[in-house]
Amino acid sequence: MKILFILCTLIYLAIPALAHNGHDHGDSAFVGNQVSTSFDLTDIQIHNLQLKEEEVKKHTLYKTITIPMTLRHAPLTEQLIAQGFIMEGKELFIIEKGMNTIIKLDVSPDKTLSGKVYEIDEEIDTTNRMFSIYSNFNTSPPFSFVGLKGEMTILLDEEENALAVSQKAVQGEAGNFYVFIRKENHFERRPVAIGHVSGDLIEIIHGLSEGEKVITQGAHQLQFVTTSTNRQTQKEEIE
């Protein structure tokens, strides 16, 4: 039993050494308890975490309103339309005929369809206390079943030259939002203030500069990188 115990101990001690000789699958980036806001990763860790990044750029964004919708036939025709539902309130009064719409169906959330608002109810539905917004389609939807549900996003005011990044880059909640900045092998967790959402983009009001690179794929994993990882990486570079 004593010999078996010694062998198990030697195997346990040898595993970390193997990991640092090219067998690190990214796990060593998540050792410890204290989360780091500025850290370095090895080339192996970056490769195995499959990180992807994008450059912070200016975009033309739209202020939007997103409401639930369902597919139906237009009155007296077989033309397929989207019927959106909105509660009474100030948002109702800024929607106008001719505004562009983006429609997503629950059965196909990765695909978007475009159209235009062509009719707005003047009277509230007394059963559900909501108004209806009707949009046509620029192209025929892939699913033509009446009753399919989804979301209708109405594009309102246009905002040019707004700094924005993919929603995948932004982490956090309840007002505490942040992104990960990358400069070669160095990463920084940076707090940001966000604005409105336009499609897959989210406006950055404060915290980023044009041309910086933010992590999109892998950002969720990076939030668990710890200070012990940073110390271990620095130790490896010195050795």
Image (cartoon, rainbow, N blue to C red):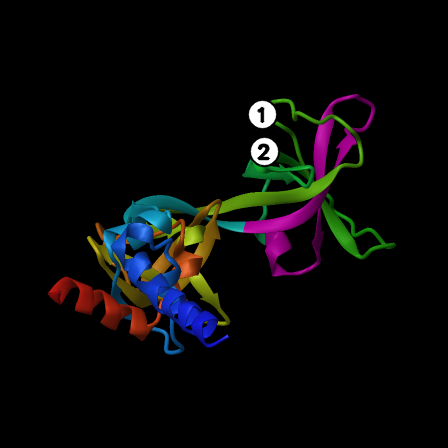
Amino acid type, callout 1: Asn
SS at circle 1: loop
- Residue placed furthest toward the right: 127
**Residue name at image x 83 percent, y 55 percent:** 128
**Residue name at image x 79 percent, y 21 percent:** 78
**Residue name at image x 30 percent, y 74 percent:** 228
Q: Where on the picture, by quarter, is residue 108?
A: top right
Let me know if residue 87 is in the magenta part. Answer: yes
Q: Report the residue marked by disc 1.
A: 138
Q: Position of residue 8 (x, y in %)?
A: 44, 68
**Residue 131 in sight in this render:** yes
Boundaries of the magenta span: 65-93
Packing grade of label 1 (10 A; few <14, some 14-19, many >=20) is few
Q: Are marks 1 and 2 in contact (CB under 8 Å)?
A: yes
Q: Nearer the viewer, mark 1 or mark 2?
A: 1
Q: Is residue 239 left or right of residue 57?
A: left
Q: How many marks?
A: 2
SS at circle 2: strand
**Residue name at image x 34 percent, y 46 percent:** 52
Q: Nearer the viewer, residue 237 or 62?
A: 237
Packing grade of label 2 (10 A; few <14, some 14-19, many >=20) is many
Q: Where on the picture, by quarter, is residue 152?
A: top right
Q: Residue 116: which disc?
A: 2
Let me know if residue 7 is in the magenta part. Answer: no
Q: From the viewer's perspective, is residue 106 above or below residue 28?
A: above
Q: Nearer the viewer, residue 230 or 109?
A: 230
